[in-house]
Image: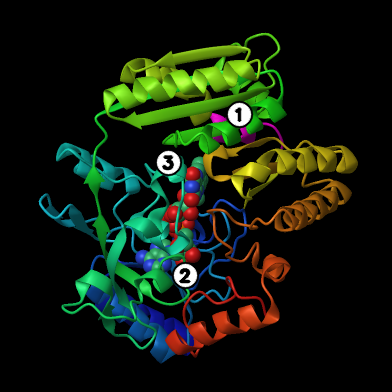
């Protein structure tokens, strides 16, 4: 123990006290993400360059410690919690833009840059980086890539993996490797898609080449209230089936609306049971035509109120209900299991009905909202953690929701990743043979289990 503590201190002296944290209060700060799972690491490294990452991996290999990569810690599946203590390797300070290539529409960044900073840099050049997790002001590109983050605009623009052209990463053998377009030659075996979504289990991303696209010329925003959740869900499915492809199509149920209304003071129209927030972008005439079509579809399903604007300032007002969901729900109960299940979007109404049945059966509030455009529903099972029976019922309800989701042809995680909290449920949607393939992939990158142990792959 003493040896190890001496080794930690000499590593701190070598890399610098500002980059290597050993004080108890600092270690606590890097012990959790938004799940509330908490394990205190033995050391935190705040890497400022790929060389710092290399040094930390080298040190971990020499001292028999594991390494848990971390961005901003906004993850929702326990991904950055260091289950075996060891080193938390935070890449948040590598917040660089190395190059924005206007002509080739690419941007080369460090892993610590936030999603919003990439979006803003692109926007200044008339370009657009579409992945848009609601955490975009805080979450890092490294974390987005590791989780293959989705967000509000997935239905039209896809998720993070559709924008990663190449990566640089530090391997479990302490080497700096490159993939995709960062390699001089393009190869058939491109490791980029394998690293995207690997949740920090295969390598530590030290830079990323991202694809940008032209910014849409115009956009229109619509806030539509419905008298039932089914009407909102089926309107979303009809909008997509009609080929309109909105950039955003967000759904909120009555309990979420109540919570947000109380939090923001915004009054809901009479009879409002659900809401769709729709954004359409493209050429101005396409936007106007699309908005008219959406309005028509929703009025046919007896929408209670439709508000629409093409003015960005007004649009912010319409967005306010959606943007306030997280803080509003946080006030509802001490305990919240927030699961991001996803089904083929035509089956969203069935999933919503199943969740409502489970809410009644377990006697628990389960507010729902999510990205209806791609069938991604955030179900929030609310409970009192001090009531142990209720906490158990909440976990049972979650398992039932996962089973219903898989039975509907869906997945237990639409965007937040598996991490530690959903690891044991992987068997619901993958066969033993498929899980075995994951194990082989992990072994070929990291046979000693150095990176992020206890995540994704069930024992
Ligand atoms: C209010 C709120 C809203 C959210 N909305 C969305 C949403 O709309 N869509 C969505 O997809 N997610 C959402 N999330 C979840 C979360 O923000 C994303 O998963 C995000 O990508 C995590 O980024 P991070 O920098 O915080 O990563 P962290 O939480 O620090 O880490 C997440 C994972 O990435 C790994 N990792 C981090 N950096 C690196 C690196 N450099 N190399 C290798 N692995 C690394 C970690 O080991 C961990 O497994 C939301 C979270 C919050 C709190």
302 relative position to 175: left or right: right
256 relative position to 241: left or right: right
Q: Nearer the viewer, residue 225 or 451?
A: 225
Q: Is residue 147 magenta?
A: no
Q: Say which element carries label 2.
A: loop
Label 2, label 3: how far apart the Cα atoms are: 22 Å
Q: Is residue 327 visible?
A: no
Q: Earlier in the sequence, mark 2 or mark 3?
A: 3
Q: Earlier in the sequence, mark 3 or mark 1?
A: 3
Q: Which mark is residue 198?
A: 2
Label 3, label 1: how far apart the Cα atoms are: 18 Å
Magenta highlight: main SS = helix
Q: Which mark is residue 56?
A: none
Which image quarter: residue 141? bottom left
Which residue occupies 72% across, 23% down?
Answer: 228
Q: Say which element carries label 1.
A: helix
Q: Where's residue 225, x and y in %?
A: 60, 18
Q: In this rendering, is residue 29 above or below 197? A: above
Mark 1 sits on what residue?
235
Start and end of the magenta stretch? 324-333
194 relative position to 170: left or right: right
Which residue occupies 34% across, 44% down?
Answer: 130
Mark 3 sits on what residue?
153
Quadrant where the C terminus is found in the figure: bottom right
């Amino acid at each position: 123990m003493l040896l190890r503590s001496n080794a930690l201190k000499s590593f701190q002296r070598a890399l610098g006290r500002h980059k290597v944290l050993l004080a108890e209060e600092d270690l606590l700060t890097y012990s959790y993400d938004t799940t509330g799972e908490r394990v205190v690491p033995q050391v935190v490294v705040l890497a400022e360059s790929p060389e710092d990452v290399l040094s930390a991996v080298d040190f971990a290999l020499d001292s028999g410690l594991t390494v848990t990569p971390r961005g901003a810690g906004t993850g929702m599946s326990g991904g950055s919690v260091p289950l075996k203590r060891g080193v938390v390797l935070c890449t948040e300070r590598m917040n660089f833009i190395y190059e924005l290539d206007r002509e080739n529409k690419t941007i080369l960044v460090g892993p610590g840059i936030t999603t919003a900073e990439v979006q803003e840099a692109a926007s200044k050049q008339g370009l657009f980086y579409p992945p848009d997790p609601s955490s975009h002001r805080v979450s890092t590109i490294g974390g987005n890539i590791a989780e293959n983050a989705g967000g509000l605009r997935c239905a039209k623009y896809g998720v993070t993996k559709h924008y990663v052209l190449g990566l640089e990463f530090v391997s479990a053998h302490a080497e700096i490797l490159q993939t995709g377009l960062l390699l001089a030659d393009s190869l058939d075996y491109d490791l980029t898609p394998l690293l995207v979504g690997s949740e920090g289990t295969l390598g530590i991303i030290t830079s990323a080449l991202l694809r940008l696209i032209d910014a849409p010329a115009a956009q229109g925003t619509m806030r539509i209230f419905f008298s039932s959740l089914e009407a909102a869900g089926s309107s979303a499915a009809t909008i997509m089936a009609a080929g309109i492809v909105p950039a955003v199509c967000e759904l909120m149920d009555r309990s979420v609306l109540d919570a947000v209304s109380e939090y923001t003071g915004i009054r809901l129209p009479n009879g409002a049971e659900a809401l769709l927030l729709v954004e359409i972008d493209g050429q101005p005439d396409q936007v106007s035509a699309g908005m008219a079509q959406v309005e028509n579809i929703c009025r046919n399903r007896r929408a209670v109120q439709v508000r629409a604007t093409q003015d960005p300032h007004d649009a912010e007002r319409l967005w306010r209900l959606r943007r306030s969901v997280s803080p509003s729900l946080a006030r509802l109960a001490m305990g919240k299991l927030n699961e991001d299940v996803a089904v083929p979007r035509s089956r969203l109404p069935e999933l919503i009905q199943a969740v409502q049945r489970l809410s009644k059966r377990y006697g628990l509030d389960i507010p729902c909202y999510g990205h209806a455009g791609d069938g991604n529903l955030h179900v929030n099972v609310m409970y009192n953690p001090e009531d142990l029976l209720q906490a158990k019922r909440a976990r049972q309800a979650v398992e039932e929701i996962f089973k219903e989701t898989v039975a509907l042809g869906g997945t237990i995680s639409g965007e937040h990743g598996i991490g530690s909290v959903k690891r044991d449920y992987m068997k619901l949607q993958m066969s033993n043979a498929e899980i075995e393939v994951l194990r082989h992939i992990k072994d070929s990158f990291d046979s000693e289990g150095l990176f992020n142990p206890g995540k994704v792959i069930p024992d």
